[in-house]
Structure formats: C-alpha cells, structure tokens
Amino acid sequence: MVWVVLMLGKLKILIVEDEARIARFVQLELRHEGFDTSTESNGRLALERILKEKFDLVLLDIMLPELDGMEICRRVRQSSNVPIIMLTAKDDVSDKVQGLDIGANDYLTKPFAMAELLARIRATLRDTNHN
Ligand code: CA
C-alpha cells in the first residue's frame, strides 16, 4: 500500500454506513492506514456523491435510509466502475450472490475484523488495477 500512496497521493474512500459508531470506527482505522475518508449515512445522498465525486473505493452498507445498498450499487454500475465492497449485517447466501451479481467487487459480513476489511480493500484496489 505504501508505494501506491507515495505514487498517487491519498486514496479516497467513501464509507456509506448509517450506524454512526461503525462509521466512526472504520473511518478512524482507514485514516490511520493513510486513506482519505468521507462518510455518508443516507442512501440517496451517498448515490449522488458516488456519481459526482471521484472516489477510489466505496464501502457500502446494505440497509440504509431512503435507498438501500443494493439499489445504490445497481445504479452506480450504470455509469461507473468505482470499486465497491459491500458491508452488511445480512449473511444470507442469496444476499451475497445478489450483491456480487449487481456489480459489487467484494462482500463482507458484519461483524468483521478490521484486519480482514483492510486486506480486502488492498486486494480490491489491486484487482481493479487502480490507476
Ligand atoms: Ca445499516
């Protein structure tokens, strides 16, 4: 990760999460890892920001006010390939399959270990040939 940060400056990650405690915890950890982070708790506003602002990766909760993560992912994919990792309390296999089918790059079930989230972020950025 260090060389990527040196070459590109801070990578921007949007954390879409309506549970304030989780959003804050994830944000603190990602900042500690050197990422530039923003948070958004409302689904509709999150969609607008993803389409308007240039993020390097989006962490996307599924259960959100106004617009759920599945719908956000579906709409984002109509015009953007921004890497998306879905974060959700649901652990039903059909939800994982649906999330991946509509274009999420990866999927992580809450509660998750921060080390695993960081590893998946690194892997997703690597896999998507970030440049
Ligand atoms: Ca939620």
Image (spheres, grey):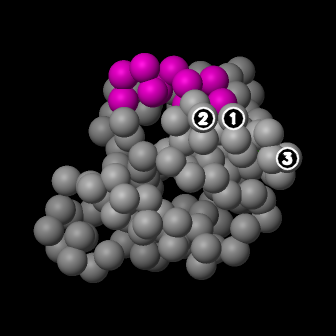
Q: Could you tell me which residue is drawn at 77 percent across and 40 percent down?
A: 95
Given residues 6 and 94, the one toward you in this image is 94
SS state under label 3? loop
The location of residue 93, given as percent across then percent down, is 81, 47
Quarter of the image where the N terminus is located? bottom left
Amino acid on which disc 2 is placed = Asp
Q: Earlier in the sequence, mark 3 or mark 2?
A: 3
Instruction: Give the magenta range.
Output: 70-80
User: Is 50 inside the magenta-drawn segment?
Assistant: no
- The number of numbered discs placed on residues in the rendered structure image is 3
Vertical placement of residue 56 versus 111, above or below: above
The location of residue 42, given as percent across then percent down, is 64, 31
Dot 2 and dot 1 residues touching (CB under 8 Å): yes
Vertical placement of residue 123 versus 94, above or below: below
* Observer able to see residue 41: no
Q: What residue is pinned by disc 3?
A: 92
Q: Which mark is residue 86?
A: none
Instruction: Name the chief secondary structure element in magenta.
Output: helix
| Residue 64 placement, left or right of 125 | right
Q: What residue is pinned by disc 1?
A: 98
Q: Could you tell me which residue is drawn at 47 percent across and 63 percent down?
A: 121
